[in-house]
Image (cartoon, rainbow, N blue to C red):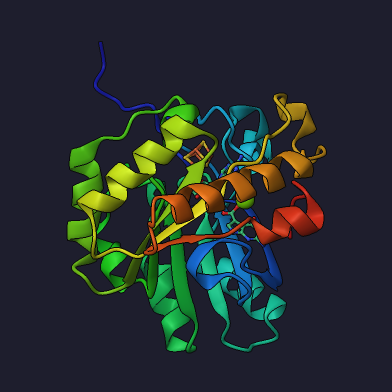
Amino acid sequence: MGGVQAVSAVEPPGIRISEIFGPTIQGEGVLIGQPTVFVRTGGCDYRCAWCDSLHAVDSRFRDDWRPMSIEQIWAQVRVLSGGEPLMVSLSGGNPAIQPLGDLIARGHQDGYRFALETQGSMARDWFSMLDVLVLSPKPPSSRMSVDRAQFEACLDAAQGKPLTVLKLVVFGDADYDFARDVAARYPHLPTYLQPGNHTPPSADAVDGPVDIDGVMQRMEWLVDKVTQDRWFQARVLPQLHVLLWGNKRGV
Ligand SMILES: C[S@@+](CC[C@H](N)C(=O)[O-])C[C@H]1O[C@@H](n2cnc3c(N)ncnc32)[C@H](O)[C@@H]1O
Ligand SMILES: Nc1nc2[nH]cc(C(=O)O)c2c(=O)[nH]1
Ligand code: SF4
Ligand SMILES: [Mg+2]
């Protein structure tokens, strides 16, 4: 047998992008309401039962993902933001899969700020370059399990440099208990709770309708829970973009 490596197995260079859109408002968590450009990478190491961004997760959408160079991504962000240094939200999929350090450095040169949304399953040394790190460990309803060591490694990688927060999705009692548990373990991290939205089960219906009544009922129930428990450190917020536009892509 020869020792030649199959070159075709090598992925094309660049960052795997599902979509770049904005400016819109950040719809979730600590930066809610802020003008933001989103850079959404393709691919995820998780498969949450209720993921609302399947078009950046499910391999059926792989053909829509494009490898892009840092300069290509950056040119698009600059056009969308009109050159005004807005907040850039790096999301996905799991954006920690992609090598994003040089992109962050490039954006910082122009005065932009960067937030990253990740489930905390992969630590990267460039987390310390971020301005905001949103860690969103997955509750029981997702049917994923948290790798505690990797989650800790994410915090270590950040070195306390970015503003680091927890964002926890809650569908019911078990998720609420999970959220309380995680928040108690990291009392120094501001905690944001958001009611889950039921996503169409089929990947063909990624832009399908969301059960807004269900979201609002869950929101009210969640507010009752935190006030009854006198959990005054938690912040309860809906996904504002979902209330406005449902599960529409690119907003
Ligand atoms: C689509 S994910 C992408 C980033 C990363 N994979 C993560 O999960 O943190 C962005 C945020 O949306 C949340 N999310 C996903 N599906 C949701 C749903 N059906 N209802 C409420 N939040 C959801 C995630 O928990 C995460 O906080
Ligand atoms: N407006 C808006 N806010 C968001 N916050 C988190 C999002 C995400 O999908 O990661 C998201 C999104 O897709 N749109
Ligand atoms: S980790 Fe995030 S992107 Fe991945 S499946 Fe779960 S919610 Fe979706
Ligand atoms: Mg989303």
Q: Quadrant of residue 101?
A: bottom left
From the image, which quarter does the C terminus lie in? bottom right
The answer to whether residue 51 shows anywhere in this view is: yes
Q: Which residue occupies 70% across, 79% down?
A: 79
Task: Look at the picture and state if 162 lies above or below 116.
Answer: below
Q: What residue is shown at x 49% (from left), y 88% (from top)?
A: 110
**Residue 62 x, y percent position in the rendering:** 62, 35
Q: Could you tell me which residue is drawn at 34 percent across and 29 percent down?
A: 145
**Residue 228 rendering spot, x and y as whole percentages:** 45, 51
Horizontal side of residue 103 vs 1, given as left or right: right
Instruction: Kindly indicate the quadrant of the structure image that contains residue 211.
Output: top right
Q: Nearer the viewer, residue 60 or 175?
A: 175
* Quarter the N terminus occupies: top left
- Note whether 10 is above or below 192 in the view shown: above
In this view, which residue lies farthest toward the top? 1
Is residue 129 or residue 151 the one in the foreground? 151
Q: Residue at x 45, y 24 (%)?
A: 143
Q: Nearer the viewer, residue 156 or 105?
A: 156
Q: Residue 67: x and y, percent?
A: 55, 51
On the image, the x and y values in percent for residue 81 come to: 67, 80
The residue lying toward the viewer, choosing from 65 and 230, is 230
Labels in figure, total: 0
Above or below, 126 relative to 140:
below
Residue lying farthest to the front in this orientation: 228
Res. 46 in view: no
